[in-house]
Image (cartoon, rainbow, N blue to C red):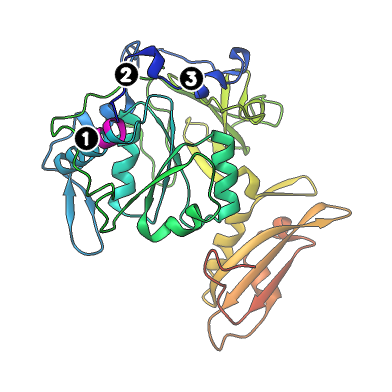
Amino acid sequence: MEPRNPRNPRDVDTFPRDRLPPPDQWPELRFDLPEPRCPERLNCAAELLAHTAPDRPVFRTASGDTWTYGELRTRVDRIAHVLTAELGVVPGNRVLLRGPTTPWPAACWPAVLKAGAVAVTVLAQQRPHELTTMCEIARVEHALCDIRSVDDLAKPEIPGLRITTYGGDSPDDLLNRRPASNEPFTAVDTAADEHIRPGTTGVPVPGWHARVVDDFGEPVPDGEPGLLAVRGPVGCRYLADPRQREYVRDGWNITGDTYVRDSDGCFSHVARADDMIISAGYNIAGPEVEDALLRHPDVIETAVVGHPDASRGQVVVAYAVLRPGARRDPEALRADVNPARTEGGSVRTESDPMPPEGDQA
């Protein structure tokens, strides 16, 4: 295959840019300090890897191997050469990444970005119909997949998808291919775009602004929970997705997290916003109730959900797994939680551990 030239406009895939949200829905980008200012063109993967000592460890594997930053850069550049010179990836292409958590997906991700492409990272547990949907939405043409996770990706026979595996013995395996060059890969220029307190997230880094707002985007008083909103040198732009209006409001990025800011300006994470239970006007964080229950010596696992209630909107329902031999006493467990948080709710106890993640029906 004749290598494509990423600097040639004819060899650029404009699909992502063509599907950006309208400019009036973009977040407001703020450059209040000189340091965060970006050049007109840069590549974030190249920047992430460029300024770290080559002998510094970056990954330690379960088998005892250690990758240094220098080794990671070499492997990233090797993969980027294969992507562009052999597989025909051009800037703007979407490349799906799938596999269990090992250093290799972490090397593939910056290699895709260095090639100017868009990394579409999916979970190894996702099923064929979910993978098909994601490939259809993003019009994915290339996939880099761990050989152990390839069956569900190959099963639906997604039209136009070229799958390259890694971790196998085939000469076509990503890691066995001989790159066209052993030189460092020249990254494609793409987008132009001490206050510590234990138990808190802290304060915004220089160049960024943050505030806690209500559902209408108005700031809430310090000490009250609300949605975290941030803005700074970069921001969120969804690919042809109506969620843009939900996650960017009046130029602020809405992260989907519930936070509280104290009078000193420190921010503390409460829960993901979709983990909040609203009961009789109270905003109740599920993790907060879980933490209270887990402090009880008889509780080894717990999960808290909101249950619909005609008078309160929702009530808190907690499921708790007790240590072997413990006496089941839901009311005693409720006593460890703020009564205002659990009024009308219930605690349900089990003796068997919960199934591992991914095994629920």
Task: Report the front residue among 51 and 258.
Answer: 51
Question: Contact (CB < 8 A) between labels 2 and 3?
Answer: no
Residue matched to label 2: 189
Q: Give the vertical position of 30 relative to 309 (above or below).
A: above
Of callouts 2 and 1, the N-terminal one: 1
Q: Residue at x 56, y 72 (%)?
A: 355
Percent position of residue 278, x then y: 74, 48
Q: Residue at x 68, y 31 (%)?
A: 214
Residue matched to label 1: 77
Task: Report the front residue among 72 and 323.
Answer: 72
- Which of the numbered marks, if any, corresponds to residue 14? 3
Q: Give the vertical position of 308 relative to 302 (above or below).
A: above
Kindly report the distance in space between the C-alpha atoms of the residues bearing marks 2 and 3. Answer: 15 Å
Magenta segment: 81-85
User: Judging from the image, what secondary structure is the residue with disc 1 in?
Assistant: helix
In the image, what residue type sits under mark 2? Asp
In the image, what residue type sits under mark 1? Asp
Comparing marks 3 and 1, which lies closer to the viewer?
3
Name the image quarter holding residue 158: top right
User: Judging from the image, what secondary structure is the residue with disc 3 in?
Assistant: loop
Q: Give the vertical position of 97 relative to 182 (above or below).
A: below
Of callouts 3 and 1, the N-terminal one: 3
Percent position of residue 196, x then y: 36, 37
In the image, what residue type sits under mark 3? Thr
Q: Look at the image and tell me in which quarter the C terminus lies.
A: bottom right
Question: Contact (CB < 8 A) between labels 3 and 1?
Answer: no
Of callouts 2 and 3, the N-terminal one: 3
Q: Main secondary structure of the magenta part?
A: helix
User: Judging from the image, what secondary structure is the residue with disc 2 in?
Assistant: loop
Outermost residue toward the right?
Answer: 310
Comparing marks 2 and 3, which lies closer to the viewer?
3
Kindly report the distance in space between the C-alpha atoms of the residues bearing marks 2 and 1. Answer: 15 Å
